[in-house]
Image (spheres, rainbow, N blue to C red):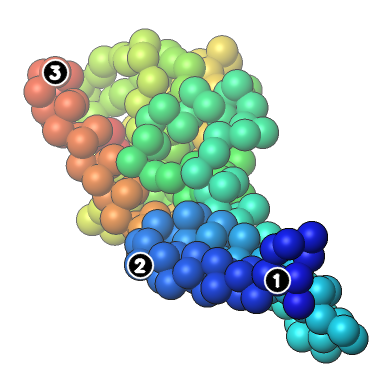
Amino acid sequence: MEIIGFDASMLVHVASLIYVMGFMVIDQLRLRTMILIGTGLYIAYYLTLDPPLWDAMFWSVIMSIANIWIITKLVLDRSTFNLSEENLKLYAVFDAMTPGEFRRLLKIASWHDGRDQIRLTTEGEKVESLYYVLNGPVEIDKQGDKFSIEDSAFIGEVAFFLESNASATVTVAETARYARWDHDSLMELQKKDPGIRAALHSILNKDMAAKVASSMGPAGIA
């Protein structure tokens, strides 16, 4: 069938070519975008037939809707859209993760002020959570050696890695602001998402290495 001098069958050839090119693309977002365009051309072709192929059109539209949903998820996974200023500041620390992985990490996090829970860990006792103090100060007492940190810091990362008891007693001031992750919930998330596990371990390793390099004291806090 021709449409004002244009052979409608060309829509099939162009759509098929886009499909073939799409299958050669590794990037999921580009692949699904090309498939969506190809499907749209198939739908346009079905409309030119007499009578139109309504059944084929119906399922093509369903597949397009599913593809659009996945494309939306892929875009959000790569975008920091809708993250609050506080979450963006925290994301700067977790930059080894994609925005999507970071959002999944945030889902199991809770935010606290210093007045909510002054003591985060107690030396020699089990550590139930991993913390990141966004705003200090942080007071550390490690075997009687006391010192403080004004900058941001992870708390409980050594115990999290080694599944050991706290190596120091850590308290925060009333002005402190920190994020908390329950140990069990964080372990479960890592099992479900290997990407988060790899990124988190990389971030914590980098953090502990920085603490050693800065001669802040024994590597890691608690």
Single out the mark in the foreground, 3 or 2: 2
Residue closest to the eye, 66 or 94: 66
Residue drawn where x is 14% and y is 33% of the image: 209
**SS for callout 3:** loop
Judging by the rendered image, the residue that carries numbered circle 3 is: 214
The alpha-carbon separation of the residues under discs 2 and 1 comes to 26 Å
Q: Residue 41 is drawn in which quadrant?
A: bottom right
Locate residue 208, reporting x and y percent: 20, 35
Mark 1 or mark 3: which comes first in sequence? 1
Mark 2 or mark 1: which comes first in sequence? 1
Residue closest to the eye, 144 or 175: 175
Instruction: Tell me if residue 64 comes above or below residue 60 in the rendering.
Output: above
Residue closest to the eye, 144 or 98: 98
* Residue 122 in sight from this viewpoint: no
Residue drawn where x is 10% and y is 23% of the image: 213
Question: Is 159 left, or right, of 177 in this rendering?
Answer: left
Amino acid type indicated by mark 3: Ser
Judging by the rendered image, the residue that carries numbered circle 1 is: 8
**SS for callout 1:** loop
